[in-house]
């Protein structure tokens, strides 16, 4: 569910939302537009250490990694629905904010530096079609302001989702 970024939201969120809009509009194709949006998120927010977009593959009942940006790739390029924090968010349709991944038994370890994570579902036609996954090296790096902002970003990315 999308919750509009409040007028009194931090300026960096408002600026970044406009940059994501521009990135989506300027993309030469779907893949380029998605990568540009991921790059904006990664580059504009120091706490967004790794940013990835996962897309639901209904036939395989999995999330499949699409565009991403970070210091290194993740080994988790396919995640079963319902598994891990990403799989939980895809199944529930709820944004997941994890302040300490080491204290959450659902966490699928990707990077030893990760301490917190936020996963925001991407909706289209009333169902989850993907998600934004962000890892951070600081504990409790994300809050409801990030959630509202990223839910707006998710709404911008939904029309660009890969189609079967």
Image: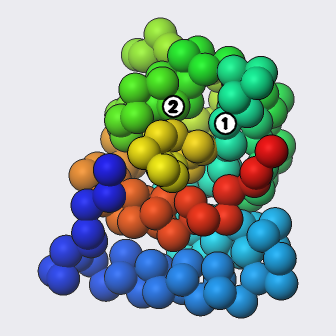
Q: Write the residue at 75% across / 53% down.
A: 162
Could you tell me how far apart the alpha carbons at marks 2 and 1 are, in whole angstroms?
8 Å
The local crowd at label 1, few if under 14, some if 14 to 19, many if 20 or more residues have their Cα within 10 Å, is many
Q: Is residue 84 left or right of residue 10?
A: right
Identify the secondary structure beneath mark 1. strand
Position of the C terminus by quadrant: top right
Q: Disc 2 or 1, which lies upstream in sequence?
A: 1
Q: Residue furthest left?
A: 8
Q: Based on the displayed image, in which of its 4 quarters is residue 149 positioned?
A: bottom left
- Rendered residue at 26%/69% (across/down): 4
Could you say which disc has been placed on residue 160 in the image? none
**Residue 74 appears in the rendering:** yes
In the depicted structure, whether residue 3 falls above or below residue 99 = below
x and y, in percent, of residue 61 in the image = 69, 21
Disc 2: which residue: 90
Pointer 1 residue: 56
In the rendered view, tell whether residue 82 sits above or below residue 115: above
Locate residue 67, reporting x and y percent. Answer: 76, 56
Determine the residue positioned at 71% across, 89% down: 26
């Amino acid at each position: 569910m999308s919750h509009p970024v409040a007028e009194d939201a931090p300026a960096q969120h408002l600026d970044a939302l406009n940059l994501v809009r521009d990135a989506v509009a300027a993309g030469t194709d779907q893949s380029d537009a998605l990568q540009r949006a991921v790059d904006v998120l990664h580059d504009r927010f120091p706490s967004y250490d790794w940013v990835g977009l996962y897309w639901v593959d209904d036939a395989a009942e999995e999330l499949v990694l699409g565009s991403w940006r970070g210091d290194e790739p993740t080994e988790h390029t396919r995640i079963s629905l319902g598994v891990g924090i990403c799989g939980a968010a895809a199944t529930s349709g709820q944004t997941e904010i994890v302040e300490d991944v080491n204290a959450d038994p659902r966490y699928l370890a990707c990077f030893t530096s990760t301490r917190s994570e936020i996963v925001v579902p991407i909706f289209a036609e009333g169902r989850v079609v993907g998600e934004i996954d962000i890892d951070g090296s600081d504990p409790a790096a994300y809050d409801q302001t990030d959630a509202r902002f990223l839910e707006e970003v998710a709404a911008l990315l939904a029309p660009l989702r890969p189609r079967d």
